[in-house]
Amino acid sequence: MSQDLYDLLGVARDADADALKKAYRRQARQLHPDVNPDPESQERFKEVTRAYEVLSDPQKRAAYDRGGDPFAGGQAGFGQGAGFSFTDIMDAFFGGQPGAGQPGRGPRSRVRRGQDALIRLEITLAEAAFGVARELKVDTAVLCTACSGEGAAPGSHPVPCETCRGQGEVAHVQRSFLGEIRTLRPCAACRGFGSIISDPCRECSGDGRVRSRRTLTVKIPAGVDNGTRVQLSEQGEVGPGGGPAGDLYVEIHVAEHPTFTRHGNDLHSTVSLPMTAAALGTTLTLPTLEADVEQGADSGVETSFELEVGAGTQSGTQQVLRGRGVPGLRGGRGDLVVTVLVETPQRLDARQEELLRELAAIRDEESPTGQVPAGSQRSVFGRLRDAFNPH
């Protein structure tokens, strides 16, 4: 190579390792055969790569700066058996630490974080509203106490792999138009761990964990709803090799309530009244959601309330009681909405029918006309026209 190596990379002679790497990345992206397959670009890519190989190695760079041959001693240039690692090129692209003699990624650890676990828990509406503590039986992987998570039988330990000499990876060399390309692959003998468990623990078969059933107490906060997940940190599966446990998620399912229906933080309830009570007005005593919670006799919690139904209440009328709904997860409390349904009697004896006919006559309701409220006789097209032209 007759051209100056520093000029090939486009850097100053005092450029540091980071400057060399950035310069090489910039040119390699432009000249790589996958981007520019023409022969001139390929040859240029070889020259730039060999220049980077020399200047990124302190010993070769020092020899070159002194005017010597950095490939002296039988080493050929790039493309002639130099053995420049393909991993080094990829590291230069993606931010690694390339350079001749640079070690690989090393063995992977047997210790890994465990998976998260999910269980579903059904609770009542009152428990969801006011919170509850429940005991759960959980079947998960736990640390093997026989080997303390190491995986080896008591008294023994993993031994270094003879195939990869504890590195966890082996080099594979193949020739191409770029020369010899060396790639590192996980060692098949030790599966990339760098060590072999010759005498596995009999309790966990070398995994470092066993399955066990245990009891946990989970505190459900007030205000949860269907689908809410309560996270229990590090209560999930213990990881391979005795690694840290994942998290346990408890997904809440709220059972249906016979009286109340939940909409967000509001509670809805429907109460039926006979026609006479709706006409004359009455006072109803209704239970609160707190009535479902076991409270002490002197707790002072209201388990019922009185609902005033005014005379002439129509079916479908709603009354809103502020602050009697479900507490919010972030504070506050929803409302209780009570809908009144007026029941029309279906079976009348002779005396009851006579009284109703007398009442109808007094109220001049013997032959009702079934009048339609004003404004409701407009056609569908008229209502559509008004909807699109409000002004």
Image (spheres, grey):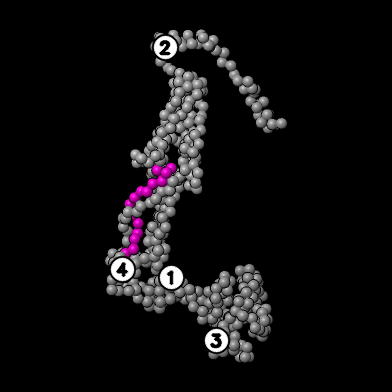
**Numbered disc 2: secondary structure:** helix
Frontmost of labels 3 and 1 is 1
Q: Report the amino acid beneath label 1.
A: Arg
- For this rendering, which residue is in front, 157 or 360? 360
Mark number, residue 75: 3
**Numbered disc 4: secondary structure:** loop
Could you tell me how far apart the alpha carbons at marks 2 and 1 are, in whole angstroms? 89 Å
Residue 330 forms part of the magenta stretch: no
- What's the magenta region? 127-144
In this figure, which residue is indicated by the disc labeled 2? 352
Could you tell me how far apart the alpha carbons at marks 3 and 1 are, in whole angstroms? 32 Å
Frontmost of labels 2 and 1 is 2
Could you tell me how far apart the alpha carbons at marks 4 and 2 are, in whole angstroms? 86 Å
Residue 376 occupies quadrant = top right
Residue at (41% x, 13% y) in the render: 348
Could you tell me how far apart the alpha carbons at marks 4 and 1 are, in whole angstroms? 20 Å
Frontmost of labels 4 and 3 is 4
In this figure, which residue is indicated by the disc labeled 4? 147
Residue 321 can be seen, yes or no: yes
Residue 160 in the image, given as x and y percentages of width and height: 37, 76
Q: Sequence order check: which comes first, mark 3 or mark 1?
A: 3
**Numbered disc 3: secondary structure:** loop
Residue 24 can be seen, yes or no: no
Q: Quadrant of the N terminus?
A: bottom right
- For this rendering, which residue is in front, 141 or 55? 141
Residue 161 occupies quadrant = bottom left
